[in-house]
Image (cartoon, grey):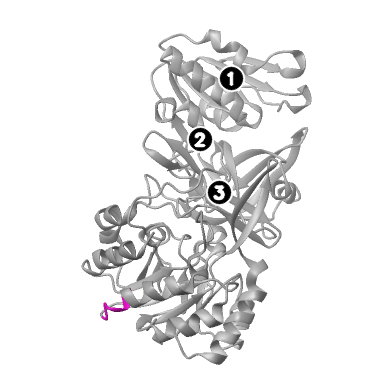
Amino acid sequence: MYGNHRVFHKSAIVCKIYKISSEIYYLRIKEKNISKNVIPGQFFHIKIDELPLRRPLSVFDVKREFIDFIFKVRGKGTRILTSLEKGERIDLIGPCGNGFKIFDSRPIFFAGGIGFAPLYFLAKNYERKGIFIYGVRRKKEFVPFEVQGHRFIRVSEEEGKKVTDFLNLVEDDDIIYAAGPRDMLKKIIGFSKRRGVKCFFSWEERMGCGIGLCRCCVIFTKDGNKRVCIDGPVFSKDEVDLKCL
Amino acid sequence: MSLNFATLKLSSPFITASGCSGYGWELKNLFPWIRYGAITTKTITYKKRPGNPPPRIFEIEGGIINRVGLENCGVFEFIGEHLPKLKKLGENFIVSIYGENLIEWVEILKLLKDRGVKFFELNLSCPNLKNRIVQEDVGYVRRVVRSLRKFREVKLIAKINAIHSPIELTKKLIEDGIDGIVCSNTFPASFIFNGKIYDGGVSGRVIKPVVLKVVKELRKKFRVPLAACGGIYSKEDVCDYRKVGVDFFVLGSILLREPDIGKWLK
């Protein structure tokens, strides 16, 4: 035990891996001892034999003994991951991080790009129903999944619409959940601070160990530096000063 | 078999490097079965340090560059929050320390010594400080070590790097009464990220040949207890260091990828 939950270091079997849209892959692994411990917003730190550092992948869904991820090819590490094959084993540490808290307010989800992964998992498990806004830059980046039960809005910059164009749907008693590019997050954090609306967001930073030991992935908060890997990746808008992000 | 590094009795020749295992107790909490010979804490300074703003880590071919910048809670919080947890796990820990000046070095050591810390690693080679790498100023280093050496009841281990006259420095350190040497810290390095240049320290496989050469020379010339730190990723790396006469191995970058590696590197 460390922090609030148990972290495992395991080798898991790859059950499925395939491309689902432009540069985005779907990966399913099987590891029944871990799957029941995962909460939305958490990630696994995946070892890539050829490289010195692991890569953090946000959990997209959990079904029985399966853990699903969707990930975008961003560089060498994620490129290597795409060559995994069914039946191979991967070495992972997790579940890492704090994950999202669920409240009794109407949720409004703002998912930009691959930020769709943690918010899809969260929305699926959210009892109160609200609005899910999912945006990408180019239409070919859409992943072929829809969030059921919530009002689902899908937009692309190519068609002239951004996720943040829908901030006007937020009412004072709502709760905002956001994951995606930094510019988008900053806009949403700024909005929620001005309006006094509750807001939780998932932050990304270049990461080392993923388990709170090396202090490489820090975010500056009102209480000093916090580690994205273990104190986050989910933070509240109240913890951060927009000017310092 | 019991090994002895500067009188620290170890059940395994593997020691965790400073900066890769938090304040020392966290790793054991995560992976209770881990058997490292000893754990080295993050470097503790007199005052709390915020460290550098991100990005703090960058991957290169065969290594990583970090620029954490000695972020730590300061000696007082360390004593209150972390040291009790660390002590609960046993005696096999080394506290890495760094002072901004002579007075701080002595104060930090005194505060920790009075609370039962016996083994100190003096961080003389952090590349992430604004002005200098401490070991470049041999005169100053000698004043530090001589001041700390007055406390005969503690063991002093110097963490040096392999590129700033390590042989000459070690000779002086031995004259001044050092109990052990860990070679090497990360080497000063730069990387470019999103068009901006950042300075940091490089570690990993890429520095191993240089460290191997230097520890070989150190071993030939001196009998001081010596631990190698630089690119230990496999049993072969351990064999290479053994071949040049080194018996203790400090694991750094590898811990970021495989925090429980001690279980197979016997």
Kind of residue at badge 1: Gln
Q: Main secondary structure of the magenta part?
A: loop
Residue B242 drawn above or below residue B44: below
Q: Residue furthest front?
A: B139
Amino acid carrying mark 2 in the image: Gly
Identify the magenta region.
B148-152
Q: Is residue A143 visible?
A: yes
User: What residue would you read off at disc 2?
Assistant: A41
Above or below: residue B223 compared with residue A44: below
What x and y, as percent, mark residue A24?
Answer: 72, 36
Distance from disc 3 to disc 1, alpha carbons, whole Å, reads 39 Å
Q: Position of residue A159 (x, y in %)?
A: 76, 14
Residue at mark 3: B56
* For discs 2 and 3, the disc positioned in front in the rendered view: 3
User: Distance from label 2 to label 3 (Cα)?
Assistant: 23 Å
Is residue B4 something that shows in the picture? no
Which residue in the protein does label 1 denote?
Answer: A148
Please tell me how crowded label 3 is: few (under 14), some (14-19), or many (20+) other residues with Cα within 10 Å: many
The chain ID associated with circle 3 is B
Query: Mark 1 falls within which chain?
Result: A
Q: Mark 3 or mark 1: which is in front?
A: 3
